Amino acid sequence: MAIKNAIVPVAGLGTRLLPATKSQPKEMLPVGKKPVVQYVVEELENCGIERILFVTGRNKTSIENHFDVDHELMRLLRETGREELIDELKYEQMAVHFLYTRQRRPRGLGDAILYGESFAGREPFVVALGDSILGLHAQSHVVRGMGEVYEQRRAVCVIAVEEVPVDMVSAYGVVKPQSGDDVFVVEDLIEKPSPAEAPSRLAIAARYVFSPRIFEALRETPPDRRGEVQLTDAIRRLIRQGEQVIGVRLRAAESRYDIGSFESYFNAFMEFALTDPEHGAKLRQRLERWLHETH
Ligand code: UTP
């Protein structure tokens, strides 16, 4: 893929996951064996991304620590003959180059993206939300495909979308598609609509490709009632200016695991743990026994 840069915003407060997120980032919560943000980074690397800018905030230093090479720990594992655990830290050797900047106050996702303007320069870039995994064990290549669509369609923005049940639309940004195709022109989009207002059931699914034109649109976008600059409002502005915004449907195998609420976090954890190659089978047996005994 020609696009080499990605911005991963991780500066949100994660209030829906309190008290778990009181002093640790939600992006560092484990789903199975790994923290959420590690899956995001591995997915991006698999899609050809070479540089990642994390937009962080207060209480987020554990993310930086997680991606640092920990020589002392490595030496200790080697000296104590636990070589097999060194494999678990292989991700530290990833070829991706990490950069960090801090959003001074959590003023919304749109504001967080603005912190990446000089990082992106004149090149198109990916935005991947740090609290969402795509595909079981992050086996999604949709970002690579979105990069190709961006080039072929001469779009300013490509958005991954996923069909959600109608009672879930109010949790997401929702798009109005021009057609029923898997790759389609987005005519409009609306942030957290009521089911009655929603133009479809296609929810924005945590991955975007942008032209640097988005920065201008973000600067022109006023904050909403809660003082947050919404990324969807800026994309809507681009559509109104006649720019091409394209939606790409996620395939079934790439479904989104959003860990922003306890319900979705528990679901993600359970599915990843039950499919863990080492522990999944036993866990499933125990769960079946427990369900049998309690009903
Ligand atoms: P959310 O919309 O889930 O918001 O963020 P939040 O603040 O993290 O969580 P709640 O609503 O208080 O529970 C989606 C992504 O955007 C980032 C978050 O870190 C998350 O990865 N984000 C959000 C920022 O980087 N800055 C912000 O000001 C808001």
Image (cartoon, rainbow, N blue to C red):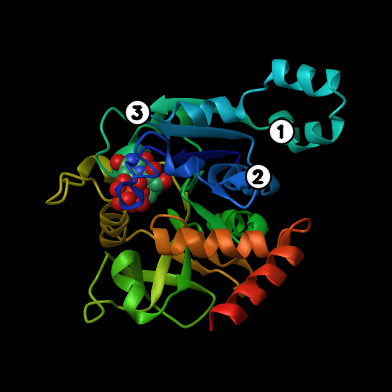
Q: Distance of mark 3 from mark 1, alpha carbons? A: 26 Å
Question: On the rendered structure, is 109 left or right of 249?
Answer: left
Name which residue type carries label 1: Met
Tag shown at residue 58: 3
Ligand 1 within 8 angstroms of badge 2 C-beta: no
In this picture, is 243 found above or below 170? above
Q: Distance of mark 2 from mark 1, alpha carbons? A: 9 Å
| For marks 2 and 3 on the same chain, the one whose residue lies earlier in the sequence | 2
Ligand 1 within 8 angstroms of badge 3 C-beta: no
Residue placed farthest to the front in the image?
293
Q: Identify the secondary structure beneath mark 1.
A: loop
Residue placed farthest to the left in the image?
225
Please tell me whether mark 3 or mark 1 is closer to you in this view: 3
| For marks 3 and 1 on the same chain, the one whose residue lies earlier in the sequence | 3
Which residue is labeled 2 in the image?
A: 42
Name which residue type carries label 3: Arg
| For marks 2 and 1 on the same chain, the one whose residue lies earlier in the sequence | 2
Give the image quarter of residue 250: bottom right
- Residue occupying the point 55% across, 25% down: 65
Spot occupied by residue 4 in the image (x, y as percentages of width and height):
61, 39
- Contact? badges 2 and 1 (CB < 8 Å): yes
Give the image quarter of residue 55: top left
Spot occupied by residue 138 in the image (x, y as percentages of width and height):
64, 55
In this picture, is 36 found above or below 281? above
Q: Distance of mark 2 from mark 3, alpha carbons? A: 24 Å
Question: On the rendered structure, is 69 left or right of 169?
Answer: right
- Residue occupying the point 30% across, 47% down: 15
- Residue occupying the point 67% across, 20% down: 70
Q: Residues within 10 Å of mark 2 (few under 14, many from 20)?
A: some
Question: On the rendered structure, is 217 left or right of 85?
Answer: left
Tag shown at residue 94: 1
In-front residue for pair 259/79: 79
